[in-house]
Image: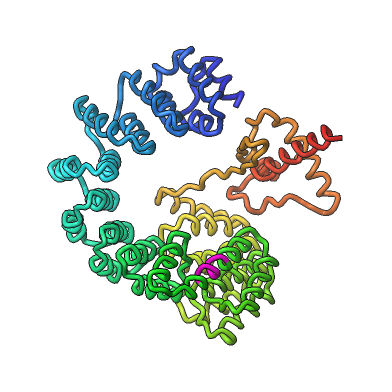
Amino acid sequence: MENSKSLLCCCTLPSPSALDYALSLFSHPLRLEIHGLASKFGFFHADPFIQTALIAMYDACGRIMDARLVFDKVSHRDVVTWNIMIDAYSQNGHYAHLLKLYEEMKTSGTEPDAIILCTVLSACGHAGNLSYGKLIHQFTMDNGFRVDSHLQTALVNMYANCGAMDLAREVYDQLPSKHIVVSTAMLSGYAKLGMVLDARFIFDQMVEKDLVCWRAMISGYAESDEPLEALQLFNEMQRRIIVPDQITMLSVISACTNVGALVQAKWIHTYADKNGMINAFAMHGDADSAIALFHRMKEQNIEPNGVTFIGVLYACSHAGLVEEGQKFFSSMINEHGISPQREHYGCMVDLYCRANHLRKAMELIETMPFPPNVIIWGSLMSACQNHGEVELGEFAAKQLLELEPDHDGALVVLSNIYAKEKRWEDVGLIRKLMKHKGISKEKACSKIEVNKEVHVFMMADGYHKQSDEIYKMLDAVVSQLKLVGYTPSTLGILVDLEEEEKKVVLWHSEKLALCYGLIVVSNRDCHER
């Protein structure tokens, strides 16, 4: 923080990435201070990036009037500047101001890009301004815009939100491929207007369906007084192991009430509570509570279903309970007559991978009745990297890349695997491929919240105001760990560095965050004595 302020005070212009990152971390008063310093030392008028970053900063704070004041002071506005201000109005629901600003942009002679047009179409939909939305649609056709998936979805959403489903359907029918996002927009539009037959036609045509599709269709049936269809679709959703959300459950309970199925409504309510709690315990690593609640469900004669078993298998996986997980998987088939789906096999593969039973994981993958997907190969690949299984990890990564050639995570992990084996030539080939595909490893960061303030640390970070104390604490912790046999591993470094250089790289962000937490706790204990 102090470093970024010092740059300005010393009349040194910070790099765009440095300023953007700094503004994202600062509290609002400090952001205002940065704005003041930028103006005081003349940087505001000297650099358009600083102007744009300040507009984005005020947008992120919800201070739309301040964002507009900064925008109005920008003398040379490019399409990025207009884009950020238009998006600021969109994010804050000021659709009338957005459309007025778009007109100002056209008057200024700046041509909109596809991103701006998508934002304007979204505003038209939210404001119910069909006539203006039609003008934007005509503009895209007259000016030769390539109608990509984002623009297609924006057009369909705009027409659907304005209730013009005939026009939405015209756009939809012209699409060479109906991806899930644009199909969901059509389905939701029909469902909201009570046109459930048309919605169901779209729904049945969709090869891939996510929770949003199921929720829209079930809600459409429930709101159109077709409760039996809503219940039938909910049962089908359960068979497909799609975990419902709260909105879906409310629609289903409403449908049960409408047909007088109060017993089923009570069961669904209880089922939702129990399954929701099991999943919550599993997500938070409390496997004992998740398993205890599962047994309590059985004692209360609440029959577990496929979703329930996903919760308990997930809990076992993250707690390393291999035997318990195997028993649950077996009982699911033999006691409850539930055929495991790909998601259940995925949980079991993850269970074996986390416990370093990698050969068992591979055997299960080879015998499961479904072709493994990206998630399953990804679990095995990551586990092989963590446990040093080079050959199997390389195989898993290549299988994953066959399914998804542009999967950047697979290439990064494959590079890590080669680096651990010091296969620098292979590392170089992978990195060249990543560069060719435009893939780069994002810089990781770790966060810790202290007194309602979030502190963010990067690798080898020196920007925190207590950096000296943090590194002293890190040295002390590492020294204590070395006494019990810990040696920092430098095997995962991706480039051929000297050992001392690698140790600097191993100042991981999470270690710095943890040491800061230890300092805070230590100081708090001193004050409480």
Q: Position of residue 382 (x, y in %)?
A: 58, 62
Residue 114 seen from this side: no
Residue at the (53%, 85%) spot, across then down:
337
Quarter of the image where one finds residue 301:
bottom right
Confirm whether the magenta stretch covers residue 498: no
**Frontmost residue, 328 versus 220:** 220
In this picture, is 30 found above or below 370? above
Predominant SS of the magenta segment: helix
Count of numbered labels shown in the rendering:
0
Direction bottom: furthest residue: 334
**Frontmost residue, 130 versus 513:** 130
Image-based side of 359 in relation to 106, left or right:
right
Q: Quadrant of the N terminus?
A: top right
| Chain part drawn in magenta | 268-273
In this picture, is 140 found above or below 58? below
Residue at the (16%, 42%) spot, across then down:
131
Image-based side of 450 in relation to 395, left or right:
right
Q: Position of residue 182 (x, y in %)?
A: 29, 57
Image-based side of 388 in relation to 223, left or right:
right
Confirm whether the magenta stretch covers residue 271: yes
